[in-house]
Each structure stands twice: as structure tokens, then as C-alpha cells.
Amino acid sequence: MRMTALLRIAMRSLSRNKLRSVLTMLGIIIGVGAVIAMLSVGQGAKAMVQTSIAGLGTNVITVFPGGGAPGTVRTDAGTSSRLTEDDVEAIRKEAQGLNYITPTTRTGAQVKYAGQNWRTSIYGAYPEYLQIRNWNPSEGVGYGMSDERGASKVALLGQTVAKNLFGEGVNPVGQTIRIKNLPFRVIGLMEAKGQGSFGQDQDDIIIAPYSTVLKKLVGSTYAQNLTASAVSEEAIPEASAQIDDILRRRFRLGPNDPADYTIRTQTEIAQAAGSVSQTMTVLLSSIAGISLLVGGIGIMNIMLVSVTERTR
């Protein structure tokens, strides 16, 4: 039988059973569409996570105090208080695989301006922090080492803070805000960063000189963590090893002693987030596959009925 005759018979059969044909097509469309949609959602989520991690900075390495010193109870990362500016300078001089390094400290505070107030996070860091995070002011300028050495009360505002204190579209540069009743002069407005990899608002932040935040807002002498940037992505493992070696010598730790600090790299964060995204993609694909299977069974039943009713 020629192909034209077969096509003619098929079209005649479809036209005689319009409802059955529509239901058959619907099963195919829903099943295939579900697979495509779920895979797209999974890939989109993976891309969003990767973009968020890239927003953390370039080749970032973070050192948290805590982890357990010899003869002591092990503590969680971030709970010890041993990292100082002297450690930063030692790493800066000896580690060859780093571009920038800074101590950082953080506190929460109520910020006020002309009757408006907003509670936000205050970060203290060296000027290199902006290079590490790939974050530049959209208005005004950043602070320098002279502000750091003089513990100047200057601040860089995130977009969320500026919007809630000054209003939408208002340039806050040159204005004076109060943080814990201390006056800070706004010298810059940071570019919008958006949502972070863990859902936090990266623009809900104020950045100020490390010495200013540490002495006048936190009241401590220790850094909460150290943040560094490796010269390249390939250099991250070597740079991490150099930091570990320097801190072990400074803390007089032996090769087998547990470290009283924790080193985390951007690569580790990306791998962990990628694993979560992969798991979610597999789960969504499985759900879509079930939809396709159900649609296929429905089509098979309809075809079986069609064959059976034509058989003596």
C-alpha cells in the first residue's frame, strides 16, 4: 500500500474520532511539555545559584575562627576570637597566591536619618574588600587606607538601605546618618547586588572602615573572619594551603593538631550549591517522567481500544 493511501486512511480515522484524537494528542503534549518545563526549571535554578555565587566576589577564600585547638573543646566556625590584623599582615607578606586580603567584622544596628530609621548589617573591612567582592560605588567614592588608619566615620550604603532612609532614586552622598547614635558621613552608594545564594538581600548593608566598626561599634580587638582573593581560580587550592601553613606556624600547631580556624573557598560553596541544584533537577525530572509515563499509558489504552474494535 502506498504512503499516500496510508496517510489518507489515518486522516479519515482521526476525523471520525475527533474526541479520541484530541485526548491522545493532549496526553502526548502534557507529558512532553512537563519534561521540558521541569528540566528548564532545574537548569534555570542552577544558573541562578551560579550567578549568586559569582556575586560573592572573585576567587574568594574566607577564614573563620573556630574549629578546635589542641587540648580544648572543639568549637563551631566563627565562634573563636583568635584572628587579628597581625595575621592579615603575615598572610599578606608570605602568601604568594593572593591578590587582596582583609579582616572583616560585622554587627547589626539601627540606622537613622531625618526621622527615618532602618535596621541593617554594618560591615567593617579594609578598602580591598570592594575589590574582593567586585563591588563598586555607583555614586560617590570608596574610602581609602587613610580613613582606615584614622578610623574615620565614613560609610558606603547598599541600595536597600539608601532607599529606606532617603527614598527611591535619592542620592545620599554627602549626607550624615547616625549608627548607634554616632554620626557617619555617606561617601558612596554601592551598585545593586540583588539576592544572594542563600536568599539574603546583599544590598541591605553598610560598609565602613574596619577599624571604625571594630572599635566604635563592635568594641572588640579580633576579626570575625578574614576574606581574601586568589590571583586566579586555579590558584585557589594553593593559596588556601599557603594560608593554612602560615596560620599553623603563627598558632604553633603541629601537622596533626586540629586547626583553630576553618578555611572555606568559593569553589567549595559552588560545588555544594551545584550538588543541591543537581538533586533538585533529578527530582523534577522524575516527576515529569511520571507525567510522561501516565500520558503514554493513556495513549496506549486508546490505541488498544481502536485496534480491538476493528478486530473480529
Image (tube, helix red, strand yellow):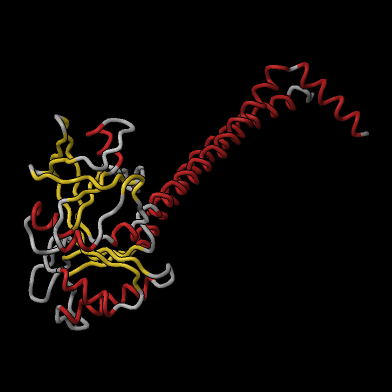
Residue 67 visible to an observer of this rendering: yes
Q: Quadrant of residue 234?
A: bottom left
Q: In which quarter of the image is residue 64?
A: bottom left
Q: In which quarter of the image is the C terminus?
A: top right
Compared with residue 252, is residue 113 higher up or lower down, i.e. above or below?
A: above
Image-based side of 42 in relation to 65, left or right:
right
- Residue 86: give x, y in percent of width and height: 16, 73
Total residue callouts? 0
| Residue at the spot 36% in from the left edge and 61% down from the top edge | 266
- Residue 306: give x, y in percent of width and height: 73, 25
- Return the residue found at the far right: 2
- Residue 90: give x, y in percent of width and height: 21, 77
Q: In which quarter of the image is the N terminus?
A: top right
Residue nearer the viewer, 275 or 51: 51
Q: In which quarter of the image is residue 178?
A: top left
Image-based side of 201 in relation to 105, left or right:
right
| Residue at the spot 19% in from the left edge and 82% down from the top edge | 249
- Residue 23: give x, y in percent of width and height: 64, 22
Image-based side of 102 in relation to 139, left or right:
left
Residue nearer the viewer, 292 or 69: 69
- Return the residue found at the far front: 174
Residue nearer the viewer, 138 or 21: 138
Compared with residue 134, is residue 196 higher up or lower down, i.e. above or below?
A: above
Residue 193 visible to an observer of this rendering: no
Compared with residue 123, is residue 263 higher up or lower down, i.e. above or below?
A: below
Residue nearer the viewer, 171 or 287: 171
